Image (spheres, rainbow, N blue to C red):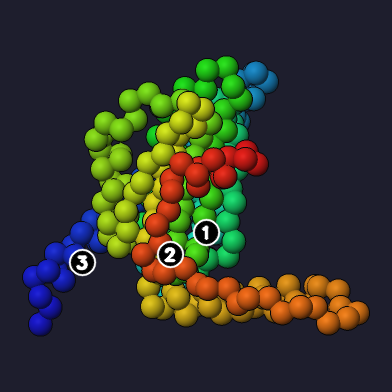
Amino acid sequence: MPTKALAHEFDDQTLLRALTHRISGGLVSTINTISASVLRTDNPAVKLALAGVIELLEHHAEIHRELAMPDRHGLVDAAESIRKLAVGLSRSSLEPIGIRLVLSADKLPLETERCWRLALAVHELVTNAARHAHFEGRDGAIKIKLSVVGGVVSCIVADNGSRADRLRPAGGLQMVDGLASNLGGRVEYGFGSHFSSFLVVFPLSARERRANRVVASRRLRGMRKAMPRRSRPQPAQAPSVPAPDNLQIDPINTTEAALETT
């Protein structure tokens, strides 16, 4: 017999999928309605304007698909998932207001639901930065940097704007705190005169650790194949020591390093 807790979780997932399906259907219906209007009008300017609206809605639909709750278990590449999300955010919301979005990420296998929670957090942090950052005449830039060291994932969302009132416990940031906590991690903040950042840190699960070891091994073999053959022996180097699981991260230094290439 299923427990009450499992039944409640199943109900929540069913409602969430129903809501996702309704929003997706609404976006498709709106796009189809506007497309019909394009066909009916003979005014070139109206056709062009409506085509722009359709394109914008399609980008929002892409974001919605990327943030849909996964319906299968397994592992997915978080870097690819965040890349697709970043493209959708850039085209739908950031480029129209002159903000450039940059992503730095290597292949990172995560369990599907955990990757989904990370994507939800990234989406909220990017939209938060776009909404509240004060660029004060500078070209706006937001950078997402996703990496893993010693079994600990760090995902930083940094911008080159100045800090205003972004640490108020609003619903969006509370949601990010909850998502990070659900991943077994935390959120850290870093601010300077010309940057603001939010850093989500969480440990890999045992399954993710195994998958990432395989990825690291393949990457190392590829690097060795690409290296030129040495003509003479080289002195031995000290072995690298893996970072501990309770990795301590300095959010300010991490943010400044992330923004160096932005």
Q: Residue at x 26, y 51 (%)?
A: 178
In the displayed orientation, state which residue is furthest to the right. Answer: 231
Return the x and y of residue 224 as percentages of the image width and height.
75, 77
Q: Quadrant of the N terminus?
A: bottom left
Give the crowd class for mark 1: few <14, some 14-19, many >=20 residues within 10 Å: some
Check disc 2: other Cα within 10 Å, few if <14, some if 14-19, many if 20+. many
Q: Quadrant of residue 15?
A: bottom left
What number of labels is visible?
Answer: 3
Q: Amino acid at mark 1?
A: Ser
User: To which residue does mark 3 refer?
Assistant: 10
Q: Which residue is mark 2?
A: 152
Q: Nearer the viewer, residue 69 or 103?
A: 103
3 vs 2, front mark: 2
- Mark-to-mark CA distance, 2 and 1: 8 Å
Nearer the N terminus, badge 3 or badge 1? 3
Give the percent coordinates (x, y) of residue 101: 58, 39
- Name the residue type under label 3: Phe
Which residue is identified by label 1? 147
On the image, the x and y values in percent for residue 225 come to: 78, 78
Q: Determine which quarter of the picture holds residue 182.
A: bottom left
Is the Cβ of the residue at disc 3 closer than 8 Å to that at disc 1?
A: no
